[in-house]
Amino acid sequence: MSGKRVGGKVYVVGDNIDTDQIIPGQYLSLIPTIREEYIRLGGYALCGLPVDQYPKRLVEPGRAPSEYSVLIAGRNFGCGSSREHAPIALGAAGIRVVIAESFARIFFRNCLATGELYPIESAYRLYDAFETGDCVEVDLQSWGLGAADSSCIYPLKPLGEAEKIVSAGGLFAYARKTGLVRGGNASS
Amino acid sequence: MTLTEKLLARAAGKRKAAAGDNLLVDVNVLMTHDVCGPGTIGVFQREFGPGARVWDPQRVVIMPDHYIFTSDRRSNRNVDILRRFVREQGIRYFYDVIDDEDGLWAFDASQGPLSAQHGSRYAGVCHVALAEKGHTCPGEVLVGTDSHTCTAGAFNEFATGIGNTDAAFVMGTGKILLRVPETMRLILDGATGPGVMAKDVILSVIGRIGFDGATYRAMEFGGDGVSALTIEERMTIANMGVEAGAKNAIFGADETTLSFVDSRMKEHGTTRPYEPVSPDGGAKYATEHRVNLSSLEPTVAVPPDPGCCRTARQLADVRIDRAYIGSCTGGKAVDFEAFVDVVRGRRVVTDTFGVPATPTIVRHLKDTKRNGQSLWDILVASGVRMTENAGCGACLGGPEDTFGRMNEPVTCISTTNRNFPGRMGHPNGKVYLASPYTVAASALAGRIADPRDYL
Ligand code: SF4
């Protein structure tokens, strides 16, 4: 992933969105390292969200990738299982940044390790300030999020060291850069 | 230092470690299964090259257990990928589903879900099987591609769940980068009253500290209440640490711990030297909570998450369509024994499914008798639909032909650990989490019931 700004439409979800809602159990037999299955995982991202509460879907059936590139969530986003399919499905769907009030630990770690998307915390309940479909810009240098139609900037918590892992492209790319791992497939 | 700090410091070759330190830690055991194993192998081969070798073929434990008793094509393909990798790498501890030399096996749905379709090495649900097969060991670091790997904290080890990429890194290097978590201390006082089980203890803790109350933290259990807990009860408690967001959950080692691990290691030839850890007197805890075990009541987590806790009594008017006993949390031998205590000589009025966690438990249920009748037969006679195909079953939904899966939007009470929307199959199904006692009583009543009325 490159560039220090990410702009686009937001998709907004509430508190405690768990990994079963991000990618339901029945799709876990898809293997993320197989290209076609990676793409299929993107098509199912967030399909476990209850339809009555989320009538607009992140990905309309058969219409991957998503029109949204930023996800805004409440507390404890990504709680539940260790399935790496979860950040991968979101990344494969086209989400570049997820901003939540807080994250579950394994999900946060998997975002960094895969390099699929930036998991960023916000002290503000952005979830109350934005609606699905709003256009925003996220600045990953000054750590702020602004709406396209207003000058108001919401501060985000800087990712610190973790930012280097995601922008390097994930754990292995970062480990090679820093000499933690040598050789292997440097192209990834 | 707390238990976790001390253990991680040692595993990183340091004399001291404090919450917030980033350490490169030596891993003793890496566990993976059929759901995350193929993806882990994919990352391993992509990153270390097609000819790469795992860091130690004795320390990678592979346990297919999730989507195995299914005719789903892709799920069976995934077990084939594990088989190929094991052969290539000479991995010693692979608990294949069947005794299958040529890799041609596939589940045969026409045999029905009830007759056993596994071979002599199959081990069942990874978290229970790791312990049964002698892979859990005090003072060690165990990581696994499954969030409930924290179960092994019951054995005084640092155990946590990781993703495929982290696991691939461990596969190639034997190491993992870890940030030392702050520790929350939970002091258990006294003993639980009749009808109250370990599941009630952890559900009430989560209800109290909140569903994200231990996020990024270690949960360390101590106090005089711990010594009375059996190893299985400690496993149930540690298992659900992740349901409060914890990185790991850990107990000290005592006689109960050592006699269990020693006997399992001896039985399976995995004996190795180990050194338990204990917390220092002046350890710094982020928070301390006291739990008075004698004041706890049968507790139920209502949908949509494991932190929404009520007492069973408060939910007496909730009608249920289904009951489920199984999983790494609630499918152990003691869980089925507790279930038997309640249903014995009665009949369930609810559709009830029983999935033992491991084949060893299936055998135990068939071999253990009460008044001349086996526990298995008592369960069947009381109307429970039991399967010999031990495994994760419907705990996380799984393919449509999974035994006990919720294919309809029904309401289920279950001894499992998660009740998020869609968890057991149908997106509009509802799952209530409870102890084996409470699930059994509810299965008899057709609504949520307090087991103390039935014991
Ligand atoms: S029994 Fe359930 S919670 Fe335990 S490992 Fe299997 S799917 Fe996960």
Image (cartoon, coloured by chain):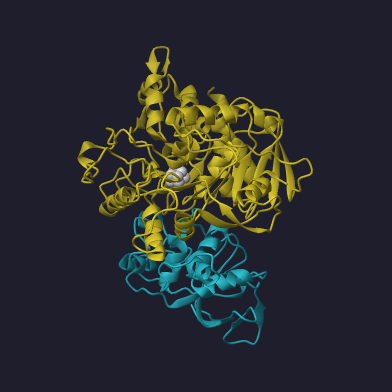
Chain colours: A cyan, B yellow
Where on the image, by quarter, is ligand 1? top left
Please determine whether, in this image, residue B275 is positioned above or below residue A6: above
Residue A30: tell me if it is visible.
Answer: yes
Image height of B424 relative to A18, above or below: above
Q: Position of residue B244 (x, y in %)?
A: 60, 49
User: Residue A106 appears in which quarter of the rendering?
Assistant: bottom right
Residue placed most toward the observer, A77 or B404: A77
Which residue does the image show at 25% across and 41% down from the upper left?
B100
Q: Locate residue B151 relative to residue A61 in the image: left or right.
A: right
Q: Residue at x 38, y 63 (%)?
A: A32
Give the residue at x 49% y 72%. Answer: A169
| Image location of residue B101, percent across then percent down | 23, 41
| Residue B147: % across, % down | 50, 50
Of residues B428 and B203, the one nearer the viewer is: B203
* Residue at the extreme top: B371
Where is residue B400 drawn, in percent x and y? Answer: 31, 49
Q: Is residue B375 above or below residue A138?
A: above
Q: Identify the residue at horizontal 38%, vertical 37% (top origin).
A: B123
Which residue occupies the foreground of this view, B88 or B277?
Answer: B88
